[in-house]
Amino acid sequence: MNISDKEAFMTARAMARQEGIFCGGSSGMNIAAALRVAKLLPKEAVVVAIVCDTGERYLTKHHSDEWLTEKNLLENDRFMLRDVVSAKRTRGVLPALISLPSHATVQEALSLMSSYEVSDVPVIDADTLAGTVRENKLMSAVIEDRLVLERPVAQYMEAPAPIVDAHEDVQTGINMLRNTPMIVVSEFGRLSGVVTRHDVLEYL
């Protein structure tokens, strides 16, 4: 398997930015290769990769924007939606993916929304996006009939939010968020997070 210097360097930078692992180019190469292999394996597979060097020796090399620009290696070091999801996890303010199953009650949905101060939550069954529940719609239904609180959210959910690949750039997400309050991010076939306009602003 061939891993270019550029892919190794970009992976090492992503490790520092997304995972807090400050590593060198050799480690970047190992992780890049491991990620390629992981894409070919079933979801339950475990891939082990060795982080074999530190980024301390490369502060003026691939961890330097100036050096990468000089070597014409920076052009594709773009911010991806997976970076936004990773930043949410790192901040620890909100889980990257807040969701409900379709059998959850309206009461449970409203409690979840109140706890995390969110107004839109994806409905996910067996890692499949089934729909979206919105606080204003649920509250309107409850005001009309208090018994709604005990009913499943499946009766009140709307169409699913758009699913976007984690490796799409942030600008793609921004463009989509002009028409929807949230997008759901998928990585390697799994739903990995929710991104809202607020999340993007926090990240940028």
Image (cartoon, rainbow, N blue to C red):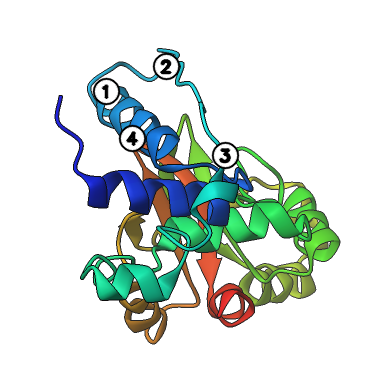
Type of the residue with mark 2: Val
Residue under label 3, please give it.
Answer: 54
Residue under label 2, please give it.
Answer: 47
Residue under label 1, please give it.
Answer: 37
Q: Do we see residue 191 in this rendering?
A: yes
Residue at position x 61%, y 51% in the image: 153
When asked about the image quadrant of residue 78, the answer is bottom left
Which numbered disc, 2 or 1, marks the residue that appears first in the sequence? 1
Q: Residues within 10 Å of mark 2 (few under 14, many from 20)?
A: few
Q: Which quadrant does the C terminus fall into? A: bottom right
Q: Do we see residue 157 in this rendering?
A: no
Q: Give the CA distance from mark 3 to mark 2.
A: 21 Å
Q: Nearer the viewer, mark 4 or mark 3?
A: 3
**SS category of the residue bearing label 3:** loop
Q: Which quadrant does the N terminus fall into? A: top left
Query: Considering only vertical position in the picture, is 68 above or below 108?
Result: below
Q: Mark on residue 29?
A: 4
- Give x and y (percent) for residue 48: 46, 16
Q: Give the CA distance from mark 1 to mark 4.
A: 12 Å
Type of the residue with mark 4: Met
- Give x and y (percent) for residue 30: 37, 28
Q: Is residue 192 left or right of residue 151?
A: left
